[in-house]
Amino acid sequence: MQLLDLRKNLVKGVSLTSLKKTLRLYKYVKPYWPQFSLGMLFLFISSLAGLAFPKLLGDLVDSSTHGHLMRDMNRLGFMLVGVLAGQALFSYFRIILFVNVTEKTLATLRQTIYNHLIKLPMKFFVNRRVGELGSRISSDISMLQETFTTTIAEFIRQIIVIVGGIALLLHTSAKLTLFMLAIFPFIMLVAYVFGRFIRRFSKQVQNQVAEANTIVEETLQGILNVKAFANEFFEMNRYKQKTLEAAATGIKSGRYRGAFSSFLIMGIFGAMVAVIWRGAILISTGEMGSTGELFSFIIYSGFIGGSVTGLAEVYTSIQRSMGATENLLEILDEPAEPITDSSLIAPEHHLSGQITFENVSFHYPSRADIPVLQNVSFTVAADQQVALVGPSGAGKSTIVSLLLRLYDPVSGLITYDGRNSQDLPLSALRGQMAVVPQDVFLFGGTIRENIAYGKPGADDEAIIEAARKANAWEFIQRFPAGLDTIVGERGIQLSGGQRQRIAIARAVLKDPRILILDEATSALDSESERLVQDALEKLMEGRTSIVIAHRLSTVRKADKIIVLDKGHIVEEGTHKELIDVDGGLYKNLSEMQFSH
C-alpha cells in the first residue's frame, strides 16, 4: 500500500514539474502580451457566442411547435445568423492574433536556444551529437508552434464550452444534468491514464527522430568517407533502422490514441442516447418544460461531449509539447560561458603575450581516471616562438585547449602577463588568439566570407592583403569568381594546401597577440608545405607563437622546444641543446624522422 501511495505521489510530482516547465516558455510571450490578451478576449467572446446557439435553436423549435408568429421565428433566425457571423468574425481575428504572437514568440525562442547553445562550454558538446542538437531547434520547436497557435486556444475554448454548457444545463434541468454528469469522472480517469502513455511514447519518438537526424547530418558531413569506404548501404540500413524504430513507437502511440478516441465516441454518443431517453421520461411526467428545452439540452450535451472528446486530443498534444519543452529546457538549463563582444576589448585586458603554466594538472571531465597533464610548468616570453613536441597522446593539444580556456585546469595556474587566466574576460582572452589547426574547418560560403571570419566587417582591401601574406592571393585570383568562389561544405572544393592558406589568411586578418599552430603543415605535400611554412613564418613575426609539430624540421628555428611525454615535460631547450642530449626523447624522435 505504501509503495502504491509513493508511486501516485511520484506521478503527480512529475506531472506538476512538467507543467511548470511548459509554463516557463510563456515568458517569451510577455513582449506580445497585449496581442495575446486581445486574442484571448476574442476567444472568450466567440466561445460564449457558440453557447448561445443551442438556446436559440431550442427557442426556434418551441416557437414553431407553439404556433408563434412568423415574425418571431424570423427574429430568432436572424439572431442565429448574427451569432454565427459574430462567432466567425471573432474566430478569424483570434487566429490572426495567435499566429502573429506564435511566430514572433518562436522566433525569439529559436534565437534564445541557439544563442545559449553557442555559448555553452566544450564539455557540453563532447557528449552531444550535432544532428541531435539540430533536431532540438527544428522539430521540437516546430511541435511547440502547433501548441501555441491552436492547442492552447482549443484547450481554453473547450473549457469555456464545458463549464458554460454545464451551467446552462443545470439551469435547464438539474436532474437531467446530474444524470448526464454521472459518466464524466470515469471518462476523465481514462483520459489521465491514456495521456500518460501517449506522453511517454511522444517523447520517445522525438528522441528517436533526433537520432535519425543525427545520422543524416553526420553522413552528409562525412560523405567523402562514406563514399571512400563504400558504406552507402551500411548507412542506409542504419538510417532505416532508426526511422523504423520511430515509426514503430509512433504506431504504438497511435494505437493508444485510437483506442482512446473510440472509447470517447462510444461513451459520448451512448450518454446522449441515455439523455434523450431520460429527457423524454421527464417531459412525459411534466418535470421538464418543453421539447425545445430538451432539444437545447441535447445540443448542449453534444457541445460538451464534443469538447470533452476534443479536450482529450488537446491533452494528447499538450503531453507531446511537454516532451519537446523538457528537451529544450534541458539545453537552456545548462550553464553557459560568460561571453562578451570580443571586438570591444578594454585597454586593461590587452595582452603582451607572456604565458606561464604553474604546476598545471588536468583530466577531461568524462575521463576523470585518466590524467592527461601532470604538474606541467613552463614560461613563454612575449613574442617568443615555442614548440610543443612529443608522441601522440602526450598532452600537446590539451595545452592548446587550456590556453583557449575551452577547459580549466583541475589544479595549478595559467597566467597571461602575470594575471590569472580566470580573471580575464573569456572573450577578451580568446579575441587576442588565433588558431591554425591541422584539420581546417571552412564554412560552406565564399572565400571572402571565410577569410573575413577572422575579423567580421573587414573591407576587401584588408582581406586581399591578408590573402597575400598567407600566399593565398595567387590561387584565389585564378578562380573565375575570385573572392566570391564558393568553397563547398567544409571547403571540399579546395585542396588541403589551399584550405590551410585560407585559414592562415583568416589568422593574419585577426592580427592576434598569441598565435597557436596545431600541426598546420603535417598533412601537406612538399610544394604546399613550402608555401604554407613561408606564410606561417611571416605570420609568427612580432607575436607570441605556440607551435605543435610532428615534423621536427618545422620547429628547428623555435626559441624554445618543450618535449612532452605521457602528460609530463621531459625536456626543454633549443633544437641545438636538445639534439645533444644522449638518450633524450627529442634526439630519438629527430633521428627516427631524419634517418628515413
Image: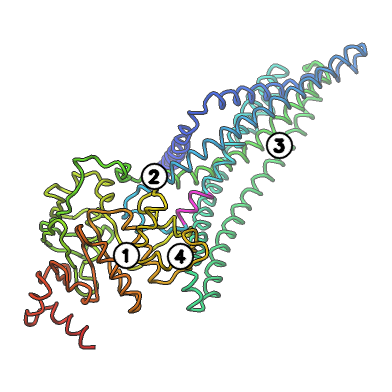
Name the residue carrying label 1.
Answer: 437
How far is disc 3 from disc 1 in space, using C-alphas?
Answer: 67 Å
Which amino acid, by three-letter code, is at mark 3?
Ile
Which percent across, then down, holds residue 352?
A: 17, 50
Is 453 drawn above or below residue 242 in the view shown? Answer: above
Name the residue carrying label 3.
Answer: 268
Query: Is 206 part of what is drawn in magenta?
Result: no
The first of marks 3 and 2 along the sequence is 2
Q: Secondary structure at mark 3?
A: helix
Query: Based on the displayed image, in which of its 4 quarters is residue 466 positioned?
Result: bottom left
Residues at badges 1 and 4 in contact (C-beta under 8 Å)?
A: no
**Which residue is more in the foreground, 326 or 351?**
351
Other-residue count near label 3 (Cα within 10 Å), few / some / many at <14 / 14–19 / ≥20: many
Is 61 drawn above or below residue 416 in the view shown? Answer: above
Q: Is residue 209 left or right of residue 432?
A: right
Of the two numbered discs 1 and 4 in the rendering, the one whose residue sits closer to the viewer: 4
**Which residue is more in the foreground, 244 or 30?**
30
Magenta segment range? 132-139
Name the residue carrying label 2.
Answer: 116
- The N terminus - image quarter: top left
Which percent across, then down, holds residue 294?
A: 79, 23
